[in-house]
């Protein structure tokens, strides 16, 4: 719809500016140097080392680059591989709902059953009692996404500690989708669940260069965990794609090793963009739920006379020339998501301003 109506696309979450210049040059150089054939199955050694070093540097969580790191085709493939590896037909998977769309598909492919625990509006916080009540003897896996797409919620230490305690008590595996690990605002901090007692040995951590280095089209992600867990994930990855983007791997290794300042600037810039879009949305009568992480914000569209986010998002391109995403696509419990809409703010200032101008004119 965005393309066919010439709309400003604040729907799909991808940045409209590129990652660090030295990283882009490194990929071009790799192609010119003939890095164009199958890389090693688990990823090139310098990238696995850079991923392990990055984890140790930021969180004090060390991983063995040879046995505990797997490079994947985006976080999406890491998630699919982990879910297919660990979930058998009839197993239950607890996931924070709303959830990123690939979770539902991967759990279905594995024959598992989704058990959603709501991060529901208007505040999008986790109800820990509801989370505790979601465990059954069939629970195999808990899927945690923080910072959370689409709500922007960042779980705090107390919440993570309780999730960790329950995971240990019920002896389940945990997959953490940490793709927005560096995109946190104000005083929010990303703390990996794997840092809590009893968690490292039961947790697969997943992240992606797509978000951290604004290279969503390169599809280089990774999974971290114990040798046993990563072997199982690798066994699936091997037959989904076998290997991942050869010339991008050395470029992402450089970004991980040398890009901390670039990422700090990205984070500050995104926080400013968040505030810019929020001010614009307030101006048209929509009060955003301020995200503490990710590059998405949510509004309830009822103040504009719409009861349904899908109806609003269907009208918006022709009415205003702007695209947003209805929350309902991220829910099993459609009712809980009905009035909410997600807006991406990872866009150039002039694009955000054009969107706001158009909304002001059209609504
Ligand atoms: N998880 C979440 C929560 C996401 O928002 C995304 C990006 N849309 C992904 C996973 C997938 O990341 P990638 O593009 O690296 O596959
Ligand atoms: N992560 C992005 C989003 O949630 C893009 C993923 C996609 O287009 N499937 O919008």
Image (cartoon, rainbow, N blue to C red):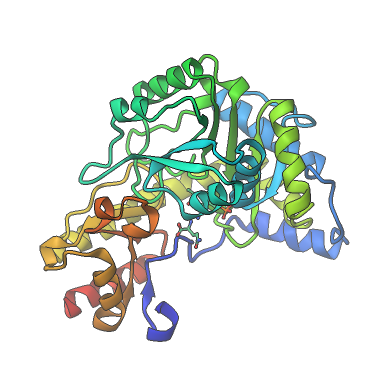
**Residue extending furthest toward the front:** 90
Q: Residue 220 in the image: state x and y as whole percent.
A: 66, 52
Rendered image quadrant of residue 160 = top left
| Vertical side of 31 occupied by 112: above or below | above
Q: Is residue 177 toward the left or the right of residue 12 in the image?
A: right
| Vertical side of 283 occupied by 87: above or below | above
Rendered image quadrant of residue 299 = bottom left
Q: Residue at x 43, y 46 (%)?
A: 267
Q: Residue 52 in the image: state x and y as whole percent.
A: 68, 32
Whether residue 180 appears in this view of the structure is yes
Q: Residue 90 in the image: state x and y as whole percent.
A: 54, 39
Q: Residue at x 14, y 61 (%)?
A: 302
Of 84 and 341, nearer the camera is 84
Q: Residue 40 in the image: state x and y as whole percent.
A: 85, 46
| Vertical side of 284 occupied by 162: above or below | above
| Vertical side of 220 occupied by 61: above or below | above
Q: Residue at x 35, y 46 (%)?
A: 152
Of 114 and 90, nearer the camera is 90
Q: How many marks?
A: 0
Q: Residue at x 35, y 49 (%)?
A: 271
Quadrant location, the N terminus? bottom left
Of 97 and 177, nearer the camera is 97
Whether residue 156 appears in this view of the structure is no
Q: Is residue 147 toward the left or the right of residue 235 in the image?
A: left
Quadrant location, the C terminus? bottom left
Rendered image quadrant of residue 116 = top left
């Amino acid at each position: 719809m965005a393309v066919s109506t010439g709309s400003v696309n604040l729907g799909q979450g991808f940045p409209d500016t590129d990652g660090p210049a030295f990283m882009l040059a490194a990929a071009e150089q790799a192609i010119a140097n003939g890095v164009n054939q199958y890389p090693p199955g688990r990823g090139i050694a310098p990238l696995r080392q850079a991923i392990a070093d990055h984890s140790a540097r930021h969180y004090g969580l060390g991983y063995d680059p040879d046995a505990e790191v797997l490079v994947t085709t985006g976080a999406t493939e890491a998630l699919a591989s982990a879910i297919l590896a660990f979930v058998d037909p009839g197993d239950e998977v607890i996931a924070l709902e709303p959830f990123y769309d690939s979770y539902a598909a991967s759990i279905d492919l594995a024959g598992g059953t989704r058990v959603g625990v709501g991060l529901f509006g208007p505040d999008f916080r986790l109800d820990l009692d509801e989370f505790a009540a979601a465990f059954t003897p069939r629970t195999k896996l808990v899927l945690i996404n923080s910072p959370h797409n689409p709500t922007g919620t960042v779980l705090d230490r107390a919440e993570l500690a309780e999730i960790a305690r329950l995971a240990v008590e019920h002896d389940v595996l945990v997959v953490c989708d940490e793709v927005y690990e560096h995109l946190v605002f104000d005083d929010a901090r990303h703390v990996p669940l794997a840092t809590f007692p009893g968690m490292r040995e039961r947790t697969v951590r997943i992240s992606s260069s797509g978000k951290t280095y604004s290279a969503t089209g390169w599809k280089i992600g990774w999974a971290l965990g114990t040798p046993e867990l990563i072997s199982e994930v690798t066994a699936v990855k091997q037959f989904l794609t076998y290997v991942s983007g050869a010339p991008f791997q050395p470029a992402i290794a450089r970004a991980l090793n040398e890009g901390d300042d670039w990422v700090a600037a990205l984070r500050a810039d995104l926080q400013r963009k968040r505030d810019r879009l929020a001010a614009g949305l307030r101006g048209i009568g929509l009060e955003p739920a301020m995200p503490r992480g990710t590059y998405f914000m949510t509004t309830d569209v009822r103040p504009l006379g719409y009861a349904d986010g899908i109806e609003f998002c269907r009208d918006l391109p022709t009415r205003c020339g702007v695209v947003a995403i209805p929350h309902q696509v991220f829910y099993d419990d459609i009712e809980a998501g009905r009035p909410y809409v997600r807006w991406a703010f990872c866009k150039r200032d002039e694009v955000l301003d054009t969107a706001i101008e158009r909304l002001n004119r059209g609504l």
